[in-house]
Amino acid sequence: CFCKLKGSIDDCTCNVDTVDYFNNMRIYPRIQSLLVRDYFRFYKVNLKQDCPFWADDSKCAIRYCHVLPCQDDDIPEGLKGDIPRDIHLNESPVDKYRANAQINDCRHSAKDHNMELGYLNTTISSENYKEFERWQQHDDAQDNFCVKESSPGEYVDLLLNPERYTGYKGTSAHRIWRCIYMENCFRPENSPHIFIQSSKMNGMCLEKRVFYRVISGLHTSINIHLCSKYLLVPQDSLQVSPDNQWGPNLDELQRRFSSETTGDEGPNWLKNLYFTYLLQLRALAKAAPYLEREEYYTGNEVEDEDTRLAMNDILNVVRSFPVHFNESVMFTGGAEAQVLKEEFRQHFINISRIMDCVGCDKCKLWGKLQIHGLGTALKILFSGKFDKWESTLNNLNRKLFFLERSEIVALVNAFGRLSESIFELDRFRRMMR
Ligand code: FAD
């Protein structure tokens, strides 16, 4: 079977079997039950942002590209920016700020709760507050690997809008992938294909290889999802998508990844999925002490406690992985390395902008979420803020560094997507047998 990958994962000290066993037995069942929790289920995203690179062709008419909007009643009170009662009692400038920010509406709900918990931990006067906030924004901007959305967007219920086959393909989809690989990945000279041939990878430095591998791994993951949840009945059916319409399509997987159809590159693309998984796994392990202290606030005490327990359980498993990706060997070597790091960050920010050009709303939703999650992982690994977390956390000044709720939701959901891809690949292997 072409998808029975063997041996070590390039640029990692780990092999495919180790990841398969660890993911399929230990991570996958846990992350599946975590992601149905309210905290992780609702993601705020702006799907109406203009494409900054070319005239927008995103007026999508494909039926399966539609994103179902969430109803106001479905959104947990705590995510709408409602102020917990005990916070009302303490009338600091920060509380007033929060009170002003609160609008109980699906479209314009208030700022991230976690972000505001950060404000609550800060004892600063209102005069200094604005100045402080300006510096904070400046500092955050230096750490981020994704572009900040210009307007807040709307909550989307991810469970109502699963990532699957939509029928998005052809010129528009190819333009996005081409733009990502040809204009925003680091490439060796004379590399005519959209992908980089594995024989040319050794001529590139580690950081540039990592950049390409994470993008290629994400591409693999998206394409595995559309193969494992393929539309199995004719598209012109009038049936309104019952769940049994979607299922695995082995021929489609083979077409996309077998050696014969991809000039021997397909198995490498599958291996890149494992690489991206390991990078995100490492980011979760590194941020674990921080994530263990999160409130996971939705306004429902029982739900929130269950989410904290489930999150801590998965973080313990993540930490137990024996051969984590080692990010400390990247971007070492003085000024030149820092220039490369900034270039790396700018390229990734650009890719996050390209997501606004995706011509299918459902693909855009999951593309944005997964790039946001990957960008958050890169921020954890390379911003330096999570290298010395202990002293900062003990300081209790969470304003010094924090992840917004949307970053945590994207990080964990994006990791869940990769985990499911690896699990699905195993299912395809069993089907082949
Ligand atoms: P594509 O996947 O479009 O690939 C283009 C070329 O890139 C290939 O010909 C090959 O040379 C190269 N390539 C392929 N895979 C890799 C890899 N892993 N690494 C390196 N190079 C590679 N479709 C859906 O049905 N559902 C979705 O949810 C969905 N989400 C998408 C999200 C984004 C951001 C984008 C850009 C597209 C999405 N699509 C989705 C479309 C899907 O990814 C394909 O583009 C589409 O199915 C057409 O596939 P294709 O066979 O022409 O090759």
Image (cartoon, rainbow, N blue to C red):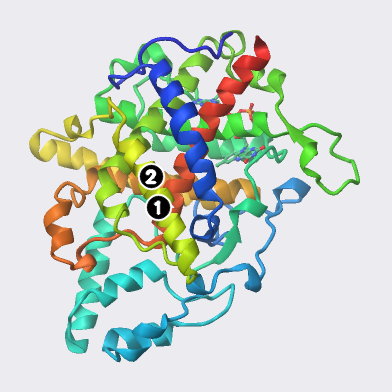
> In front here: 418 or 263?
418
- Where residue 274 sits, quadrant-wise, is top left
- Which quarter of the rendered picture does the C terminus lie within? top right
Q: Where is residue 217 in the image (x, y as percent from the top left)?
A: 46, 29
Q: Residue furthest left?
A: 334
Please determine whether, in this image, residue 411 is positioned above or below residue 418.
Answer: below
Identify residue type, mark 1: Leu
Please determine whether, in this image, residue 308 is positioned above or below residue 283.
Answer: below
Identify residue type, mark 2: Asp
Q: Residue at x 54, y 76 (%)?
A: 108
Q: Name the residue under label 1.
A: 309
Which label belongs to residue 35? none
Q: Is mark 1 on a helix, strand or loop?
A: helix
Callout 1: few (<14), some (14-19), or many (20+) C-alpha neighbours within 10 Å?
some
Ligand 1 appears in which quadrant? top right
Q: What element carries label 2?
A: helix
* Residue 62 seen from this side: no
Q: Mark 2 points at which residue?
A: 313
Q: Position of residue 414 (x, y in %)?
A: 47, 43
